[in-house]
Amino acid sequence: MGDPRLLRVAQPVTTFATPHLAALLQDMRDTMAQLDGAGLAAPQIGVDLRVVIFGGFSNPRYPDAPAVPDTVLINPELEPLSDEEEEAWEGCLSVPGLRGWVPRRRHLRYAGFDETGQRFERTVEGFHARVVQHECDHLDGVLYPMRIRDLTRFGFVQELFGDQAPPQPD
Ligand code: NI
């Protein structure tokens, strides 16, 4: 947080199934795995492209997190399906050591492309919808602290949760 590359509106991907895209995705997967993340967006490793990855959780630290499929989502489009919001704790690999209480849309349809250029669409809710909104915000230069309405619910993991595992992964 504070790096200007996190504040850009990222560029769409125009060619798929390239070595360049494969290398980017490998870098992103390695970064997410190394840091125990729930997801990662290309701008978080300094790459100005509309690419996010998320899901595929196998992290024993977060056994209660609902299953989200291991996903590559490129040039995403998000469509809220209702006005209903829900609030929950979020963290971010670009905002290490902190958690904030963030409102998100509860019901969502999203569409985009996988790394081969195949278009897909999903209708999701709850935690899955939250993860998608968090990651896609990175493509528009938005970090979760910008979404917090009550800044008394933004703080260091140790202060908020003590020695308990925090309720959401980064
Ligand atoms: Ni993030």
Image: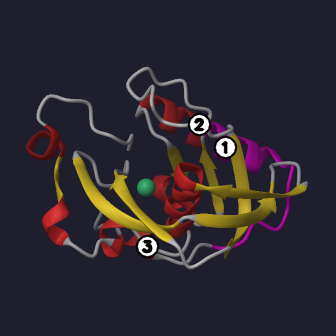
Q: Which residues are magenta?
A: 11-27
Q: Is residue 120 visible?
A: yes
Q: Secondary structure at mark 1?
A: helix
User: Of residues 148 and 41, which is closer to you in this image?
Assistant: 148
Q: Which quarter of the picture shows residue 6? A: bottom left
Q: Of tags 2 and 3, which is closer to the observer?
A: 3
Residue beneath disc 1: 25
Q: Nearer the viewer, residue 106 or 120?
A: 106
Which image quarter is the C terminus in? top left
Which residue corresponds to the image point at 45% horizontal and 39% vertical from the top-left? 37
Q: What residue sits right under mark 2 in the picture?
A: 29
Numbered label attached to residue 11: none
| Residue 87 rendering spot, x and y as whole percentages | 38, 62
Residue shown at 43% from the left, 20% from the top? 60
The residue labelled by disc 3 is 142
Q: Secondary structure at mark 2?
A: helix
The residue type indicated by label 1 comes to Leu
Q: Tally the marks.
A: 3
Q: Amino acid at mark 3?
A: Val
Q: Position of residue 133 (x, y in %)?
A: 54, 64
Q: Are marks 1 and 2 in contact (CB under 8 Å)?
A: yes
Answer left or right for 137 relative to 53. Answer: left
For label 3, count other residues whose C-alpha is less than 10 Å away and answer few (under 14), some (14-19) or many (20+).
some
Amino acid type assigned to the residue bearing label 2 in the image: Arg
Position of 50 relative to 89 (above/below): below
Q: Secondary structure at mark 3?
A: loop
How far apart are labels 1 and 2 at the CA level? 6 Å
